[in-house]
Amino acid sequence: PNPSLLILPGDGIGPEVMAEVRKVIDWFAAERGLAFDVSEDLVGGAAYDAHGTPLTDETMDLAQLADAVLLGAVGGPKYDDLDFSVKPERGLLRLRKEMDLFANLRPAQCFDALADFSSLKREIVAGLDIMIVRELTSGIYFGEPRGISDDGRGGRVGINTQRYTTDEIRRVARSAFELARRRQNRVCSMEKANVMESGILWREEVQWVHDNEYPDVALSHMYADAGAMQLVRKPNQFDVIVTDNLFGDILSDAAAMLTGSLGMLPSASLGAPMANGRPKALYEPVHGSAPDIAGQGKANPIACILSLAMALRYSFDRGDDAALLEGAVERVLADGVRTVDLLGDATTRAATTSEMGDAIVAALSRR
Ligand code: NAI
Ligand code: MG
């Protein structure tokens, strides 16, 4: 049977960028014999409009069975006043939670044609290609006890708890080491073992996984604050960075600014291996539904197209095809094709969403 791909375009620019992904999928089917069983369904506000819930049980079941899920974006002003339980974001949160997607992969890759777009100097970001692996389902955002209460002295106290178990650390560490083996074989683990107990455990468990299961991968440890400094000073020193939920949230946003536009950033969230050995997987652009430009043909489809490239590499073992697709994106950018978000002060005419998609498909054919 063909591998299965569930597509959830969602809201706002989600369906617009996903239409361009469909062109790319069709090209791979026609030219590279890569036939997926593609199904499409609703998520977020679109699902709420049709079914009164941001994710139906039927769609959840499809996601659990799919070899990979590709999501556009959810949300928009139309849904801002909805009850929390049916907000579009809840559809996405349910997917992540029920699929138990504990490893969030955020690449920070700088395409040469966009190096001047980075928040940093070209010399620092040229050739940049790092991968941040953030633990996504535990840590201080979920730990108990938590809450705001009286402090007994007329004030209040806000409490969150950073809590990590051996299993939680080891499984995300394994994801990072697996990734490193397909890349430059280097992992840097970041925590604050100098001031946090959970940081000490993190460091020890990552080291344990390394020594017992991945001794061939080069492992280093860094305090997360020093890591933030190094990310900005000399980002090219890193290959794979693995870190907890909180530090990963911050470090991945900082790393995103090394590369240019939000419209360029893909992501993956991976869970445990399924019976066929593939990890449970959800791929999505980092950006949201961009209501300010929705419906105007202005959205940059590259983040979503690069998310498909990640799916090719990490779910379908088609690293060559992923590289082909990334190369096509690189050539189109080198040719000067720019959606509005990539124009900056330039006065050339902006490409529409669909022109960008067409240009990438054309570049695939003239490789
Ligand atoms: P956003 O990412 O949708 O937009 C931020 C800014 O970046 C906007 O000016 C937008 O026009 C621009 N932008 C984003 N993606 C772009 C693309 N592909 N091409 C060109 N420009 C792009 O974040 P914002 O505005 O904070 O949130 C808008 C809605 O999206 C909200 O309802 C929010 O809850 C939702 N959201 C959903 C996410 C998801 O589905 N994973 C993630 C973030 C926000
Ligand atoms: Mg964040």
Image (cartoon, rainbow, N blue to C red):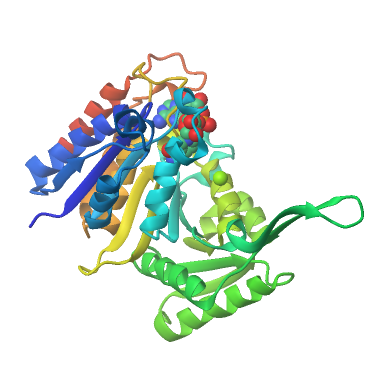
At x 14%, y 38%, the residue is: 27
Identify the image quadrant of the C terminus.
top left
Front-most of 86 and 366?
A: 86
Q: Is residue 208 above or below residue 126?
A: below
In the image, ligand 2 is in what quadrant? top right
Residue 271, by quadrant, is bottom left
Asked if residue 107 lies left or right of residue 312, the reply is right
Asked if residue 224 lies left or right of residue 337, the reply is right
At x 25%, y 64%, the residue is: 278
Asked if residue 101 lies left or right of residue 40, the reply is right
Q: Is residue 97 above or below residue 276?
A: above
At x 34%, y 37%, the residue is: 72
Residue 111, by quadrant, is top left
Identify the image quadrant of the N terminus.
bottom left
Residue 253, by quadrant, is top right
- Residue 285 image position (x, y, % from top left): 39, 40
- Residue 323 image position (x, y, % from top left): 27, 50
Residue 367 appearing in the image = no
Outermost residue on the right side: it is 153
